[in-house]
Image (cartoon, grey):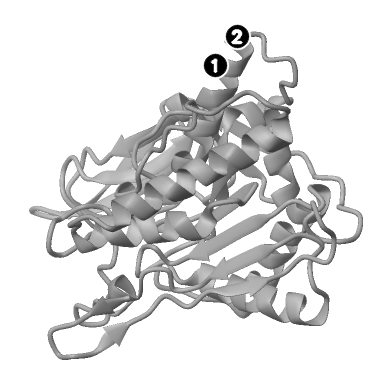
Amino acid sequence: MRSLASGAVLHIHTHTFKGTVPGAGRAYIQSSMHGSEVQGNAVIAELLEVFARTPPRGDVVLVPNANPFAINQKAGEYTPGRFDPTTGENWNRTYWLPTLGDVRRPRWPQLKQQAWSRLASQLRTRLQGDLPFGRRLALTLQSLAVGADYVIDLHCANVSARHIYTPEHCADAARYFQIPLILSIPATFDGAMDESVSAPWWTLWQALEAEAYPDLPPPEDLPRGYTLELGGQEVISREDARRDAAGILNFLREHGVVGGRAKKPEPAYLCRLEDYKVIHSRHAGHADYTAAMGVGVKKGAQLAQTLQFGPSPSWLPTLAEEDCIPVLHHSSAIIHTGSELLKVFTNVRKV
């Protein structure tokens, strides 16, 4: 919770469903760490209805409005809820990277429980310290996710096609979310929630492999985090939320958290993080984003055209320098030279 100067108190509300099958996988799902990214809240509303009718096999924790302070930031009609207004930090870059390596070496299920217990203890200790609000919020959310095999962080991105950030060691499983654009990231840490889960477990797995640990699980059995980018900011669609929720449920079915048989995933397009490129505007003016997001274009195709006023109006094109899939573009049509214009998948592989 956070107490405001006015005396108002903001709370994080959690919804916990106890699984019907002991030992089934566990999931943690949160939304709106960034205040303007609200589609995930609609998705969690759909999941709440589903689980109220049919409880999951495994434990599930749902946290809508994970950052109520950011959601309540308004500047005119806009919600500038991406950065902490006090520190300037990106809310999704304030998580903590735990260390799981200092555990004994029993069989894998016991070792995993030891690591989770160590993580929970470390988080409790850190939360007792003197922390800025953003860091305290992130650690609180991490503590809610302890014990989850699958941590799913729901975001949005400017004006965007739906896409997924997945650890590269289990990218194939991400196809079960039924989102056709997959961004494969290495198990490194840059402060994000999904990385705070995937990176330490991958580090532990590599250490176990190096010492010939006899009960080593396959990498795809490690706890891991995903970030789902569910379209654009500042918009919400119940119809789309039903489809988004269906994809999450399909993933959870595949991993035994939800009952039923998962649908076989459709083909998807995979891009490595190093091949996810930013296109900066060479032209100041008013940008008309002409390329459809999520649809592949060939080298030389027009991605945008920018209106400039001089002696007479002119439209200046931005062309694709290589085959790519435009994924998102700047939220505003008003662009300065050097502004981030678009992000695109390159060197795409169909999976």
Q: Quadrant of the N terminus?
A: bottom left
Q: Position of residue 154 (x, y in %)?
A: 52, 59
Q: Is residue 223 visible?
A: no
| On screen, residue 272 above or below 121 | above
Q: Position of residue 253 (x, y in %)?
A: 82, 55
Viewer-proximal residue among 346 and 298: 346
Residue 51 figure quarter: bottom right
Residue bearing the label numbered 2: 211
Q: Is residue 256 left or right of residue 152?
A: right
The CA distance from mark 1 to mark 2 is 6 Å
User: Do tag 1 and tag 2 residues touch (Cβ < 8 Å)?
Assistant: yes
Query: Quick one: SS at disc 1?
Result: helix
Q: Residue at x 50, y 60 (%)?
A: 144
Q: Quadrant of the C terminus?
A: top right
| On screen, residue 221 above or below 24 | above
Q: Is residue 76 visible?
A: yes
Q: Farthest residue in the left direction?
A: 311
Q: Residue at x 73, y 28 (%)?
A: 107
Q: Farthest residue in the right direction?
A: 261
Viewer-proximal residue among 226 and 328: 226
Which amino acid is tagged 2?
Answer: Glu
Query: Which mark, residue 21?
Result: none
Residue bearing the label numbered 1: 207
Viewer-proximal residue among 153 and 342: 153
Q: Is residue 92 left or right of residue 286?
A: right
Which amino acid is tagged 1?
Answer: Ala
